[in-house]
Each structure stands twice: as C-alpha cells, then as structure tokens.
Amino acid sequence: MTIRCFVIISACVGMSFALSAWVTASLSLGVVGLSLGLVSAVLAAWHWSAKESTDEISEEREMVSMVALFKQLPVLDETVLANFAERAWDITFEIGDDAQTFVAGCSPLFVIKTDKRLYTVNHTDSPYFENVDEVVGEVAEMRMRHVLENHQSWISIDLISEPSDTDLSEEYALIGQLLNQFLHQDGLAILIPQQMRLIPWDKSVESALVGSNPLKNLSSANAPVIPVEDNNPKMLAAVECARAKWPQFESAFEAFMRDEHRDESRKFSVKTQITYGGRTEYIWMIVTSIENQIIYGTLANQPVALGNLAAGDRVRVSVGQLSDWVYPDGGLMIGGFTIKVLSDQANQKANEKKMGT
C-alpha cells in the first residue's frame, strides 16, 4: 500500500489542462483541505492507467460533493472503502489502479473508479473549517453549533467525472448511498458545500441519504434549538402564559385518553426543562400520561448535549418544569406560546443581518 500511495502521489507530470483547470475551479468553490498537487497526482495516475476514456472534464462543470463530519475519524483503507462501495452500489471493485473498476490510494486521499464515474474520497483528521470559531459565531441554532464545535474530522466524496447525460439527482443519490456507509460510525452531520447546508445527523438523514433524491430530501427531523437570554421578557411572559393555561391542555389530554376511538396520530406535547450531567436544555416531549402533577412521556427530539439521552427515551418531569405545550384540535394547533417568540426572534436576526449586508 505504501508503494502504491507513493507512486500515485509522485505521478505529478502529464496532467491534462482540463483536469487541472477543473480541480482549480473546484477549490475556488470552497473545498476545504484539498491539496491541488495531491488531487492532480491521483487524477493523473488514473488518467494514465484507465483502459478507456471518460468524458472530458470542463472547468465550467458544477461541483458535486457531500461531506460527513465526525468527532473521531473512522479508520479507512482501500479494502474498507472497496467493501463500502460494493455494499452501496452493488459493484465489484479491485484494489489498485489497473482494473476497470477499482479503489486506490491511502489516507488522506482515495480514488474510486466505476465503469462510468470517477470519485475522490478525502479522509481528513482535522476540522473541516479552518476558522471554526468564526463559523460558529455566525450560527444561532444550538444543534448546529454543537456539531461545529465538536467535529474534529471529516470525509468527503467528490464526483470528478460522470456520463455527459447524467442527472444531478442521480449523482447525489450515488454519493449519498456511499456516504451513509460511513455515518453508521458515529457521524455528527452532513454538509453540502454547494448549498452551504449543514444537517445534523438523525435517522431521517439516513433515510434521505439512501433515497432517490437526497439533495431535495435531506433535512433534520429535530426541532431547531435557539438560545434565548434568561431574562428575555417576551419569553418569560410566554412561559407564564403556558403554565397559567396548563389546565386547558390537561383537560384536552384527559378527554383524548378517554376516547376509545381516538386518533393515535394526534400528539400532545410539552416543552420542558431537562437537566443531565450539569447541562440543561428545553426540549419537547410527547406526553403519554399525567399523574399527580408529574408528566410522563418520550423525548420528541434528539437532545443537543444531554449525555446518553436520545429521541424516544422515556422521561418524566413535574408540571412546574414545563415552559410550553401544544396539541392539535381539528386543523388548529393549540398552544405554542414560546414558538412565536422564537420565530419572531429568528426573523428579527435575519432582518438585522440583511440590513447589515
């Protein structure tokens, strides 16, 4: 493996202008951490050894790439990558660059070639963003901030060459299927550089990645977590209103539970304060029962940083800990007192940022 990597990295001459121009263009779009010389060398090695030509790569071509962020970089070598690609795409791969379909390279850069496509896989043991603190400062949502602050490594899959009549949704579907193989190993989030979208990892992300159009369907099932000052008067008033009107929720929930023909898709939810390991979050839970001023239920969202607690876990809290509640009634949602405050705050910040630009 060491010899092969040395050969690939050393084969830096003879690169066609089109390949070099495309790499330069893709770097200008913000592919962080890529080495132009290293990528050019790998592509050159493939260019010389491929048994048949592929479509010419133009510097005008749109970059197609997806990135997975990790706290700890998964172990990766040619064999592991080939196994992942075979499971994702149902294609047999050889190790080395002298076959029709192959996986070659070593960390931090690998190449995958199918009969119609060429990919690079970046395997990088450092933060994706060089200026992490600045990026975090621009993000208000706490779940995304947590991902950015805690990720220490990343893996990207970049499409280098594809059939001329290809559809972008098909290309992203193929990349998503492969990237999903890595995310089973404690992935934190998916990043789509072309759209500057960061999607924290949850089960809905996995479903989207293996679907037919991940670019369209990727979104987090978790509610956004927005920080609010403890002394925010509007938030304090909203919480007070929710607690004052709690009997309305309790009566509606009891009537729902007494109904033998109740629609189980109706969810009665409360937002409550939960403390774990010295950290406190306000999080939504789906109510399953209320007894003696104690609310029992399951976490509706994935916590940001509450130890091993996860969406779906059973929890119980006192009524005095709730800060909001909501339930459906016909076509209306009743409650949601703090939701409006958070929405107004987000809109205000967006307007301020817009005015600032």
Image (cartoon, rainbow, N blue to C red):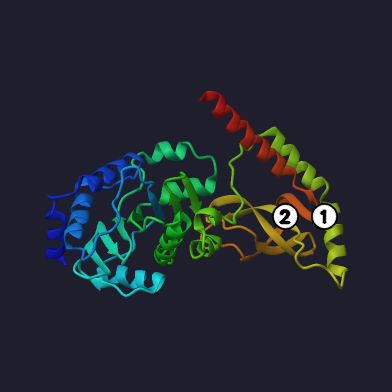
Question: What residue did someone put label 2 on?
Answer: 270
Looking at the image, residue 62 sits to the left or right of residue 226; the answer is left
Label 2–label 1 contact, CB within 8 A: yes
**Would you place residue 176 above or below residue 227 in this image?**
below
Query: Does 203 appear above or below 122?
Result: below
What is the quadrant of the N terminus in the image? bottom left
Q: Earlier in the sequence, mark 2 or mark 1?
A: 1
Q: Is residue 110 left or right of residue 321?
A: left
Q: Is residue 170 above or below residue 146?
A: below
Q: What residue do we see at 16% from left, 55% from top?
A: 9
Amino acid at circle 1: Phe
Between 304 and 123, the one lying in front of the other is 123
Q: Tell me the residue at 56%/24% (across/down).
A: 355
Instruction: Give the image location of residue 305, x and y in percent.
Output: 52, 54
- x and y percentages locating residue 161 in the rendered image: 32, 55
Query: Between residues 335 and 274, which one lies in front from this camera angle?
Result: 335
Q: Is residue 96 above or below residue 332?
A: below
**Residue that badge 1 annotates:** 249
Task: Decide if residue 339 is in sight here.
Answer: yes
